[in-house]
Image (spheres, grey):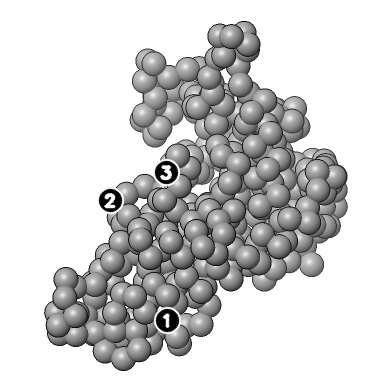
Amino acid sequence: LYLYTGRGPSSAAMHLGHLVPFLMTQWLQEALGVPLVVQMTDDEKFLWKGEYDEAAGAYDLDRFRALTRENAKDIIACGFDPERTFIFSDCEYMGHMYPNVCRIWKSITYNTARAAFGFEGSSNVGQSAFPAIQAAPSFPSSFPIPLSKTPRSDHMACLIPCAIDQDPYFRVTRDIAHKIAPKTHPLRGKPALVHSKFFPPLQGALGKMSASNTDSAIFLTDSDDEIKRKITTHAFSGGRETAKLQRELGADLELDVSFQWLRFFLEDDDELALIEREYGSGTGEYWNTAAVKTRLIVELQKLVKEHKKRRDVLTDADVDKWMAVRALAPAA
């Protein structure tokens, strides 16, 4: 078994929504003791967000390649096993995967791709071709060197922790996997997925986390004061309009962003159950929104501070080591 996850480098600072799948992946790697490959889709972000600079007479592809290295530091800081983790840029590693990419292209019709991903006549040809590039790491034969220490590595199973919006890529991948993997593969090459639920933005379910709106999310570069300000000012509340109604009815926990975030980041299940009971009924220490927001602020300040501490000591040389094409240690 090996793990596969990824990140599209669109901004220098990752936010907590980006972090959730990596925290889940780190836990899985630690629990299972298996190799992990992390795909940095600098090509994808360029194909969707890149621009042509008329003055410079060039595309801005190198900007996304630079963001890959910055985001890699945030990923390394999650605590992965350096002996069992390979982080790679599509732009740099493509030659190793290209035979499988070609096989996947041959296996997927354009009608299937258009139905799954909504491609239109205005989509550039790179966008139409990209799904095969995201599919390729699902097959261990795309990593002849990183997985070379595992016997019969082409028969390894692949488990993909990812956000649920990535599901269409791997539904298509599972449909054609038998054409890519060896016939003797125990799962006929089909990868398995573990989805993380969508992480609500601060504005609530109708909003969207965005790097262009810094008040929509908590970023891994935010200071303690910024975290406190954002949660206090912008975290959508499921509490009632008055203290009297809150005492009578309790909060709407499904709408309350602070409680929903605590469900992701508060490790103590007993404390979470206490907050759910008291806030949902308008009783006890956590009867109101302010108390729940205060608890969340403490938890997020601790999380971001510890992450910053691990990230700040990383150098470009460290990133080079994690991104070097090398043989990973086999499963423990």
Inspect the image, locate mark 2, and give the three-letter code of the amino acid beneath it: Leu
Residue 111: name its quadrant. top left
Residue topped by disc 2: 206
The front one of 161 and 99 is: 161
Residue topped by disc 1: 272
Q: Residue at x 24, y 75 (%)?
A: 251
For the question of whether residue 321 can be seen, the reply is yes
Inspect the image, locate mark 1, and give the three-letter code of the amino acid beneath it: Leu
Cα distance in 3D space between marks 3 and 1: 29 Å
**Viewer-side label of 3, 2:** 3
Cα distance in 3D space between marks 3 and 2: 15 Å
Q: Residues within 10 Å of mark 3 (few under 14, many from 20)?
A: few
Residue 296: name its quadrant. bottom left
Give the position of the C terminus as an image quadrant: bottom right
Q: Position of residue 217 (x, y in %)?
A: 44, 53
Which of pointers 3 and 1 lies earlier in the amino acid sequence?
3
Which of pointers 2 and 1 lies earlier in the amino acid sequence?
2
The front one of 221 and 205 is: 221
Give the position of the N terminus as an image quadrant: bottom right
Residue topped by disc 3: 213
In the image, is 300 to the left or to the right of 56?
A: left
Q: Residues within 10 Å of mark 2 (few under 14, many from 20)?
A: few
User: Mark 3 and 2 residues: CB-CB less than 8 Å, in contact?
Assistant: no
Inspect the image, locate mark 3, and give the three-letter code of the amino acid beneath it: Asn
